[in-house]
Image (spheres, helix red, strand yellow):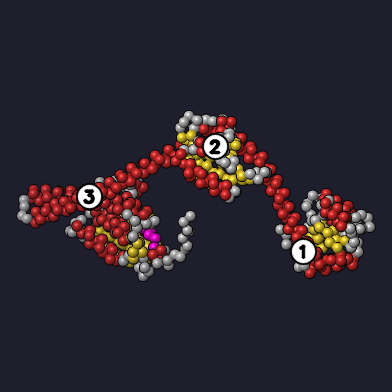
Amino acid sequence: MNTHFRILILEDTEADAELIERELRKSRIAFTLKRVYTKSAYVDALANFVPDLVLSDHTLPQFNSIQALKLCKEQKRHTPFILVTGAVSEAYAVRCIQQGADDYILKSDLSRLSATIKNTFKQKQVEVEKNRAIEALRKSEEHFRTLIENSTDLVNILDSSHTITYSSPSIEKLLGYTPAEMNNKPIFSFIHPEDTHCVSNSLLKELVDPGLVQTAEFRFQHKDGSWRHLESVGKAYRDDLGNVNIIINSRDMTDRKRAEEKLIQQNIELEKINAELDHFVYSASHNLRAPLTSVLGLIKLSKMQKQGTEVDQYLHLMERSIDKLDGTVRDIINYSRNTRTGIQYERINFAATLNETLENLQYIDPSILIEQHITIDERLPFYSDKNRLSVIFTNLISNAVKYRNPYRDQSFIAITVEVTPEKAFITFNDNGIGIDAKQIGRIYDMFYRATDRSTGSGLGLYIVKETLNKLNATIRVDSSLDRGTTFDIEVPNMYQVQNAPPSHESIPCDR
C-alpha cells in the first residue's frame, strides 16, 4: 500500500479547498495535492495526475459530483471517491454511495476527514485484493480443471463423510476403475485395513483445519485385487455453500516402494558383508601376523647359529618371503582401517612422528645407510590424524629406502615440514632411481608396480592416496629416471575445528 498519496480536490471555492488542505496536514498523511474546478481540468487530472484519492464538492459550475463520480469510475482504476460538501441531503449522499462513492463528509465536520480517508484506503485495498483473489481463483479453477483432465496423477474429491464425489479420468489407468465406479463410494472401502487409521487421522486433521495440507502414504486396492502404494497430498476447503470438502492428489509409488524395499534388503546384506570383512581384517591382524612374526623371529635366531652357506641362503630367502607377506597383510590392514575408522584429530609433533617412523623402518635392512635431512617449522600448532599420517610417512620413506639408486655413492632422503594456520606443507625428496614419466599416471593404482625392483604388494601409494583423500589432503609427484622423486603434500590444519567454542544452537522440539 502507498505511503505517499496523490489527492485530487474538485472544489471551486478556494477558501474551502484551503480548509480541506489544512485538515489533511493535521492528519499527517503524506500527500501531493492538486485542485481543479472545471470539467476539462478534472478529466485531464484523472488521466495525467492519476490520483490515489478524489475529494469532490457536490455543486460545481459545469457539472456535479454524480457526473464527477461517473468520470472517475470510467478510469477503471478503483480510485477512492469521497464527497465533501457543504449541504446535501442524506438521500443524495446515499445515492452517491450506491453509485460507487466511498463515503461523504460535510464541510462543517472536517474533523472526520482524516479517519474517513484512512478507512477508505483500507477498504479499497481490501476490495482490490478481493478482486485480485477472485480473478486468480477463476484462472486457477480453469487451470486446475485442465490439469485434472490431463494429469497422470489421480485426483479425488471427498465430502465431509469421506465419500468420493469426484475422481479424475486418470483413475482408470492407475487403478482400473472408471470415475463412475468410484463416485458415492466411501474411500476407506478401498484402503488397506492396516492403513485406515493413518489416513483417517490425516483426513480428520484436515477437516478440523481447512487449508492445512496433509500428506500420507497408504495402500489402495486395484480393481484386479492387488494393492498399489499411493503417495497422497490432501487439503480441505469450503465450497460456495460452506460445506467442507477434501481434495486429494495421489501418485502411484508402487514401483518406487518395491525398489526401496529391495535397496533396504541389499543394505542389510551389505552390512552383513562389511561386518564379515571387518572380522576378517581383525583375524588378519591377529591370526596371520602373529604366526608370521614368530616364524620370522625363529629364522633370525637360526641365522645367528653357525650354519652352512646353503642353509644361510635358504634362511635369507625365507626371511624375505615372510617380510613380503607380512608387508602385504599390514597394507591390507592399513587400507581397511583408513576406510572404516573415523578420523581422530590430535596435535601432531612432526619431529617425534617422523623419528618414530624412521626407527620402525630399520627392519628393512639395517646395513643400508641413507642420509636423512629433516627440516621442520612447526611453530604453530597442527592438528590431524596421527595414525593416518604415520601410514603416509611409512610408505613414502620406505619407498625412498627400497628404491635408492645403487650406483650412487650416497643416497639421501630430505623431508621438510612447514605448518601454517591453514595447512601443513610436507615434502619428501630423494635421489633414488626415480619413476618413468610413462608410469607416473598409474602409480596410485591398486596393485600397480612401476618397476621390476618392486617387492611390495603394490598397495603402498594407493593407500597413501586413499588416506590423504580421507584427510581432504592433496599430493603431487615430480620424478624422472635416475634423478629421484619428490612428493609434495598439503594437509589441512584442523586446529580451528578442534578448538572452536561449543555450539549453542537450539535443538528443534520433537513434533
Residue 308 lies left or right of residue 108; in this view the side is left
Residue 338 coordinates in the image, percent (x, y) = 32, 53
Numbered range of the magenta stretch: 488-494
Residue visible at 77% across and 58% down in the picture: 120
Quarter containing the N terminus: bottom right
Mark 3 nearby-residue class (10 Å; few <14, some 14–19, many ≥20): few
Is residue 468 visible to the viewer in this orientation of the structure?
no
Residue 236 lies left or right of residue 507; in this view the side is right
Q: Residue 270 or 421: which is nearer the viewer?
A: 270
**Pointer 2 or 1: first along the chain:** 1
The reply to whether discs 3 and 2 touch (Cβ–Cβ < 8 Å) is no
Residue 159 lies left or right of residue 384; in this view the side is right
From the image, tell me which residue sits under label 2.
186
Q: Residue 173 or 402: which is nearer the viewer?
A: 173
**Residue 333 vertical placement versus 359 (above, below):** above
**Residue 491 vertical placement versus 70 (above, below):** below
Residue 81 coordinates in the image, percent (x, y) = 82, 56
Which label sits on residue 283? 3
Residue 489 in the magenta stretch? The answer is yes
